[in-house]
Image: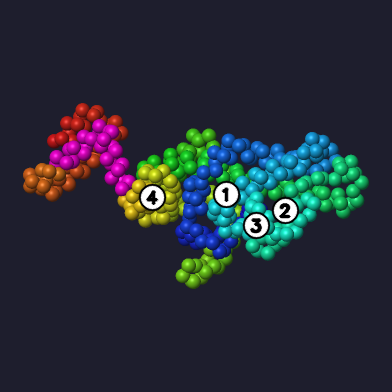
Amino acid sequence: MFSFKAYFWNNDVYINGQYKYAANEILTAYLNSNYYEYIDEEDIIYNLEHLKKKMIITEDMDYEYYEKYSSNAEHAIYLFSQINKWLAVLPPYDKILQDQIYTDDPITWDTVTPNGVGDCNSAGNFYIRLNKFVPAVLEDIEFYDGHMFADLQDMNRSITNFFDGYIALLKSYTVVHEIFKPFITEYLHRKETFISANELARYYEEFKNNAVKSFSGIQCIMNSFGYKVLKGGDGEQILCEEITFEDLQSFLYYDFLNGVRKNYIPNRCKLCGAFFLIRGGKYFSYCDRPLKDEPDKTCRDVGARRRYDDKCKNDPVWQTYNRAYKAHYARYMKKKMTVSEFEEWSRFASVIRDKAVAEEIPFEQYYADIRK
């Protein structure tokens, strides 16, 4: 249900050959979404798994399930509608499923049946939206002819697959917040700069050994792999890797490491806290979103300065460095230090500052040395 094809070319990925995203752009959108706590607190995955069992119709079906079949179905539809609302704003499903996602919006079409109301989506497909679910009497199942029994089995398979699709989707979503997010924030940006291939391998292994949940738990499901020629943004033909992914987490796992190797990396802004995508080139610790109180400026415009000011107010090591820097800069401006002398002192001060921050030298020694 939620499978799709992805076509990879350089730093871009084309979903179903049509919708273009940068590497890790889709993951960044999921990192910024806020449905995880609701899924966890309401135990939606558990509820869907149990509702699935209650929807399967068999001769020995629990009579309570049969008696409450309609209310259980309505509960499931409510949960599906909630998830569909999330999908309507999350890539790539906001595009590839835009005509297939049904929510609980008011029905306006005029065909009515005793059990539901007809509807038509924007693609022109007609369907019946049921509001009453009453299975046949259980005892009658044994009298079904071959065709009816086969239809019942097909229906049970369809129900199972439908639930399983949504359950897999929610598990993919939780993986983003339970595995990708901690690895990105606690390992990938540990040095606050791009990392080498060797460092990536070391961090990946360290995360696998230390984290409660790690990437080793992700089973990457690819149904097919090949190559296909598409037209790029400039109209030129490009030869892309073509991969069919059965679930979202498989795509995110492949796209993530593929993007990291090219320095297309999600990062959390150190000012506003939202995730943003570093698109190769220069490493950034701040995003380019406008500030709420100063919309003409971005986090990137003011973030580094604010962070430096905060350090100088609250951290004795940085306070000492800032005062020493101002004193030596004043000497330089008064021609008491040459350019080369000031640059040499600046390099020396940065080195011992970092050692003091890491507690590799005593603060007293640092305080005396940096003021020379």
Closer to the chain start, of discs 2 and 1, is: 1
The residue at which mark 1 appears reads as 86
Mark 4 vs 3, N-terminal side: 3
Residue 239: give x, y in percent of width and height: 52, 66
Place residue 310 in its image quadrant: top left
Asked if the residues shown at circle 1 and circle 3 are in contact, with their CB atoms under 8 angstroms apart, the answer is no
Please indicate whether residue 282 sits to the left or right of residue 183 in the image.
Answer: left
Reading the chain from its start, which is encountered first: label 3 or label 2? 3
Residue 315 part of the magenta-drawn span: yes
What's under tag 1, amino acid-wise? Trp
Residue at 82 percent of width and 49 percent of height: 152
Question: Relative to 326, is 5 on the left or the right?
Answer: right
Q: Is residue 248 visible?
A: no
Residue tagged 3: 100
Question: Of residues 142 and 132, which is closer to you in this image?
Answer: 132
Tell me the tag on residue 287.
4
The range drawn in magenta is 302-328
Which of the two labelled residues, at mark 4 and mark 2, occupies the earlier sequence position? Answer: 2
**Number of the front mark, 3 or 2:** 2
| Figure coloring | rainbow
Quarter occupied by the C terminus: top left
Tell me, for residue 129, which label it has, or none: 2
